Amino acid sequence: MKVNIDPSWYEVLRPQFEEPYFAELKQFLVEERARYTCYPPGSLIFNAFNSTPFDKVRVVILGQDPYHEPGQAMGLCFSVPGGVAVPPSLVNIIKEINTDLGLCIPATRGDLSGWAEQGVLLLNATLTVRAHQAGSHQHHGWERFTDAAIQALSQHRDGLVFMLWGSYAMAKRSLIDTTRHHVLTAPHPSPLSAYRGFFGCRHFSKANALLGQPIDWSRIR
């Protein structure tokens, strides 16, 4: 089963594409798109993998679902295309970066492609969603696929920094070999929880200290 995914990831995840669940997932998506508007566009479903090849990953940020309103989802968790209103969670992420690193990134910028190009894998657990219905494509196979991606990174790479924000992302800690990788946890940047510890977590400076070669977190378009 051919998919539009970077060859380095295809080699690592090849067994997943050959599993019956993936064929069922593909059929589910065909039926969903025949009846509903779904996000992101088909060409961007694997954008996180295509933007950050397997051997280039340095940091992993985990999200849950793509954005589900028009024009928002671009296949990178928390990211929106340039010119699109920045969602509240991303506004809070930018606030924390500015405080942590002494920057002045405008909260009107929301395209995180510049992070992905530096090795930050911006991975949602579920890679598609039905318009206006958060969580509508959960439990149809995507989680198994993205869990396999996390496990592959854990098993075949060393010294990665995983940023797990909120209880959903923190539950993925069990997939990560913490003797080989660094795991940073904090409450979710949502306005409902950011003041419970996301603000002040300093994950961006901590990640740079762990990596040695820093990420330029100001590269938000």
Image (tube, rainbow, N blue to C red):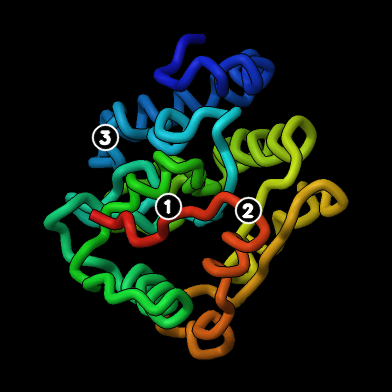
Pointer 2 and pointer 3: residues touching (CB < 8 Å)?
no
Residue under label 2, please give it. Answer: 212
Task: Give the residue at x 60% y 28%.
Answer: 55
Q: Could you classify mark 3 by the number of other residues whose Cα lies within 10 Å: few (under 14), some (14-19), or many (20 or more)?
A: some
User: In the image as oriented, which residue stretches furthest toward the top?
Assistant: 1
Instruction: Identify the residue at horizontal 58%, vertical 79% (top origin).
Output: 201
The residue lying toward the viewer, choosing from 147 and 213, is: 213
According to the picture, the residue beneath numbered tag 3 turns out to be: 41
Please report the residue visible at 34 percent of the width from the left and 74 percent of the height from the top.
Answer: 103
> How many angstroms separate mark 2 from mark 3 (CA)?
36 Å
**Gap in angstroms between the C-alphas marked 1 and 2:** 24 Å
Identify the secondary structure beneath mark 3.
loop
Which residue position is annotated with label 1? Answer: 77
Amino acid of disc 1 = Cys
The residue mark sitting in front, 3 or 1, is 1
Task: Kindly report which numbered mark, 2 or 3, lies closer to the viewer in this rendering.
Answer: 2
Horizontal relation, residue 215 to residue 164: left or right: left
Give the amino acid type for the residue marked by disc 3 in the picture. Pro
Of all residues, the one furthest to the front in this rendering is: 212
Foreground tag (1 vs 2): 2
Q: Residues within 10 Å of mark 2 (few under 14, many from 20)?
A: few
User: Residue 111 at what x, y percent from top left?
Assistant: 27, 53
Q: Amino acid at mark 2?
A: Gly
